């Protein structure tokens, strides 16, 4: 079968194209933004990429199936031809995955506002360490897996990020509705994606839908400390629930957590039984919960005649994380620089608190680019201000685009509110000016007065992250 991906160079679309190629299909696709690393990965795997969009070209190629990416909307030349001609079958990416891959697997679906990429990477990593051959589709670059996707064994486990964002311009349901969860992980739940959800209750509504899809012989692994998840589970009788967290109501409990110079340590118990102790390079209770959620899912999948907590935790010590998730770029006595994908107030707050605990003697400098469809809007401006107040200094870049319209975040107001709370806060008029001011702050760092710079962005941040790291990284 020849499958054509419309918008093939996106992270999810590209990795899905690689999956279909690995399953033996002929794969091609089109995109406007063709650049490494995804373009190189696709072409090296034998995938043909067409530059730009052309209805005439698509009519000539005549693939067996067209996959419509989330970047496609009405007015797209290839899509308009498909709608008018009805010459070819087309599906969304989630529908492709459900019909061509997931229906034959034990699907471990990782859902939640935060931590999906890390928890998915952890789950696939632990299964591989246990000797399984899982498949996975991850929206990031895991450092401990050979790539962002792999087909795995037919009939075996498949780990996939359960994104609550909508599916396509013609299907406004959340993507995870298509993912056939056998084991559903609910990491956390907050209001996000203000461009498609009205409020928190609207987000809870879509999560309630995916919960209803878990079969009787499956499991719901839920954050037992999350007040927004709790009401969704009150009347669930069709599938067993395993709660994970620090609270006494949790089946899997995180105990004795502490930050260390190398990362963090914690213990896990399973329904009162000692499961094991973890010492690893990741920071924060939120990452400990990510690990506990992943280990629990793996334990439930692999459990046979042994108790679930017999699943070994030793491999967690080798886990290096995901690129752009609290990734350390520079580490010198005077300066540490960290890159994080954070684009939600809670993510910023928890990361800053974890960095403060791990490096308590460094001046903490946050550089934040409001870029996501939620972050650019004013609706969470006060929450972002509260989060950035955990830093000693904050530089807030101009909002990346104006999708917020009249409700656009006012970065000057954020900086002023932070200064009133004792934070050295600035709202430069450009990313380039932000880079200059950040360099001034970094140049003031010494081994006797060290600093830590953390970049928060779910985009490129104007290329300044790499420039900063390249300049400050010690010569080999």
Image (cartoon, rainbow, N blue to C red):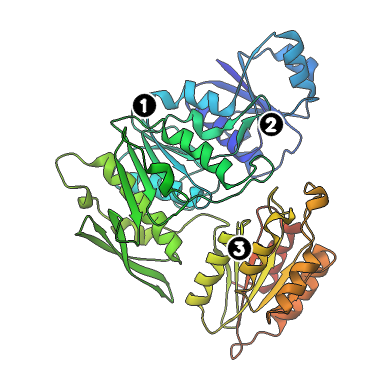
Does residue 34 lie above or below 434 as drawn?
above
Specify few, some or many for label 2: CA neighbours under 10 Å numbering under 14, 14-19, or 20 or more. many
Q: Which residue is mark 2?
A: 7
Q: Upstream in the sequence, badge 1 or badge 3?
A: 1
Mark 3 packing: few (<14 Cα in 10 Å), some, or many (20+)? many
Residue designated by label 3 = 339
| Image position, residue 110 (x, y; %) | 45, 43
> What is the CA distance from the residue labelled 3 to the residue labelled 2?
27 Å
For marks 2 and 1, the one nearer the N-term is 2
Q: Residue at x 74, y 21 (%)?
A: 79
Q: Tags 2 and 1 in contact by the CB under 8 Å rule?
A: no
Quarter of the image where the C terminus is located = bottom right
Q: Which residue is mark 1?
A: 154
**Mark 3 or mark 2: which comes first in sequence?**
2
Q: Position of residue 431 (x, y in %)?
A: 80, 63
Task: Give the x, y percent position of residue 363.
Answer: 61, 81
């Amino acid at each position: 079968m020849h499958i054509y991906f419309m918008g093939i160079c996106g992270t999810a679309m590209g990795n899905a194209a690689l999956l279909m190629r690995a399953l033996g299909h002929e794969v091609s696709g089109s995109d406007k933004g063709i650049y490494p690393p995804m373009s190189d990965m696709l072409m090296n795997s034998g995938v043909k990429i067409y530059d730009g969009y052309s209805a005439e070209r698509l009519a000539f190629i005549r693939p067996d199936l067209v996959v419509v990416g989330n970047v496609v909307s009405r007015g797209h030349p290839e899509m308009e031809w498909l709608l008018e001609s009805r010459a070819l079958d087309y599906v969304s990416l989630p529908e492709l995955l459900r019909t061509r891959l997931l229906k034959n697997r034990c699907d471990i679906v990782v859902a939640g506002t935060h931590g999906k990429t890390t928890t998915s990477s952890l789950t696939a990593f632990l299964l591989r360490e246990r000797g399984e051959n899982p498949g996975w589709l991850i929206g990031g670059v895991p450092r401990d897996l050979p790539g962002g996707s792999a087909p795995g064994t037919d009939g075996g486990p498949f780990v996939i990020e359960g994104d609550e964002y909508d599916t396509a311009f013609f299907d406004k349901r959340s993507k995870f509705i298509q993912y056939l969860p056998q084991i559903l992980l609910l990491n956390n739940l907050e209001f996000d994606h203000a461009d498609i959800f009205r409020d928190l209750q609207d987000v809870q509504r879509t999560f309630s839908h995916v919960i209803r899809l878990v079969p009787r012989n499956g499991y719901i692994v839920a954050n037992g400390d999350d007040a927004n998840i709790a009401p969704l589970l009150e009347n669930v009788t069709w599938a067993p629930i395993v709660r994970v967290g620090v609270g006494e109501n949790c089946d899997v409990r995180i105990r004795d957590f502490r930050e260390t110079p190398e990362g963090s340590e914690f213990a896990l118990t399973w329904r009162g039984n000692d499961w094991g102790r973890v010492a690893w390079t990741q920071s924060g209770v939120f990452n400990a919960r990510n690990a506990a959620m992943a280990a629990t899912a793996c334990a439930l999948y692999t459990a046979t005649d042994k108790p679930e907590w017999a699943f070994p935790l030793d491999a967690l010590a080798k886990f290096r994380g995901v690129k752009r998730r609290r990734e350390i770029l520079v580490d010198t006595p005077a300066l540490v620089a960290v890159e994080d994908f954070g684009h939600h107030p809670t993510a910023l707050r928890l990361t800053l608190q974890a960095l403060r605990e791990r490096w308590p003697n460094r001046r903490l400098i946050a550089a934040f680019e409001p870029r996501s469809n939620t972050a650019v809007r004013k609706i969470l401006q006060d929450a972002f201000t509260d989060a950035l107040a955990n830093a000693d200094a904050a530089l807030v870049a101009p909002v990346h685009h104006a999708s917020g319209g009249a409700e656009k975040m006012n970065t000057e107001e954020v900086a002023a509110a932070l200064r009133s709370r004792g934070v050295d806060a600035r709202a430069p008029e450009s990313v380039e000016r932000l880079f200059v001011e950040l360099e001034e702050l970094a140049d003031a760092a010494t081994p006797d007065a060290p600093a830590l710079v953390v970049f928060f962005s779910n985009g490129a941040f104007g290329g300044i992250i790499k420039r900063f790291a390249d300049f400050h990284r010690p010569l080999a």
